[in-house]
Amino acid sequence: AQTVTQSQPEMSVQEAETVTLSCTYDTSESNYYLFWYKQPPSRQMILVIRQEAYKQQNATENRFSVNFQKAAKSFSLKISDSQLGDTAMYFCAFHPYTGANSKLTFGKGITLSVRP
Amino acid sequence: GAGVSQSPSNKVTEKGKDVELRCDPISGHTALYWYRQSLGQGLEFLIYFQGNSAPDKSGLPSDRFSAERTGGSVSTLTIQRTQQEDSAVYLCASSPRGRGVDYEQYFGPGTRLTVT
């Protein structure tokens, strides 16, 4: 079974600054996907970024990038030039590459507040 | 195109009553998932449908919970004899096939269930 740990329950950042959200996971799988999802107050879960474990290059999506350390089983999200609209809960999630266990395992989430 | 829709948006019910929550996935998506999100918690997997295969019910917390998916499209989550601990946001997600990059899940806005 997989576990996903987000040890920081809350973080705050000043608008325009950079913030890093931490995530670690535990698995015996060698191939898998990792995701960061954003859940604003509207409750709508939105995919922020995705990383495939077999790719060494860290994924980037505009102001969002990850630091994927496979050996350390670490998958942190960096948000650059933070904006007020980035205020939300952020969830790290794990999905095995194949197999019958086709479901996402989520961390408990972190509440990010962007201060004006 | 249209995203995942869920109804009702909010539901208040008395303890002991039955409730039905509805999910309309994105057209053509063969995989459908139900999750429960309690206050301040991450997402808890409930059940997963993939095409015509038998659903993965391993996350259902008790036999009061059941779900069906008719015609490979709309899904209904039923909670019988509701208890106060059932109060949570129930999220539905769909994905195209559950393989490769199609593991990406698209979430609905959720149904907030309050049991009084």
Image: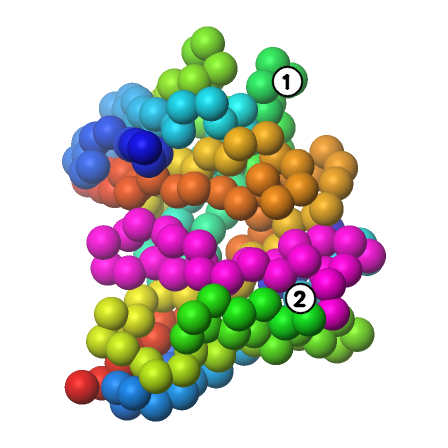
Q: Nearer the viewer, residue A62 or A71?
A: A62
Badge 2 local density, few (<14 within 10 Å), some, or many (20+)? many
Residue A22 position within the rendered picture, expressed as x and y whole percent measured from the top left? 54, 77
Judged from the image, the secondary structure of the residue bearing numbered disc 1 is: loop
With respect to residue B3, does B23 lie above or below? Answer: above
Chain ID, mark 2 = A
Q: Which residues are magenta?
A: A30-56
* Residue A8 on the magenta segment: no
The amino acid type, in three-letter code, at marker 2 is: Tyr
Chain ID, mark 1 = B
Which label sits on residue B106? none
Q: Nearer the viewer, residue B45 or B13?
A: B45
Q: What residue lies at 38% left-to-right and 19% top-to-bottom?
A: B74
Q: Which residue is mark 2?
A: A25
With respect to residue B75, does B110 lie above or below? Answer: below
The residue sitting at the top extreme is B71
Which label sits on residue B54? 1
Residue A7 position within the rendered picture, expressed as x and y whole percent measured from the top left? 53, 76
Q: What residue lies at 49% left-to-right and 15% top-to-bottom?
A: B72
Q: CA distance from mark 1 to mark 2?
A: 29 Å
Residue A20 position within the rendered picture, expressed as x and y whole percent measured from the top left? 48, 82
Q: What residue lies at 36% left-to-right and 72% top-to-bottom?
A: A111
The amino acid type, in three-letter code, at marker 1 is: Ala
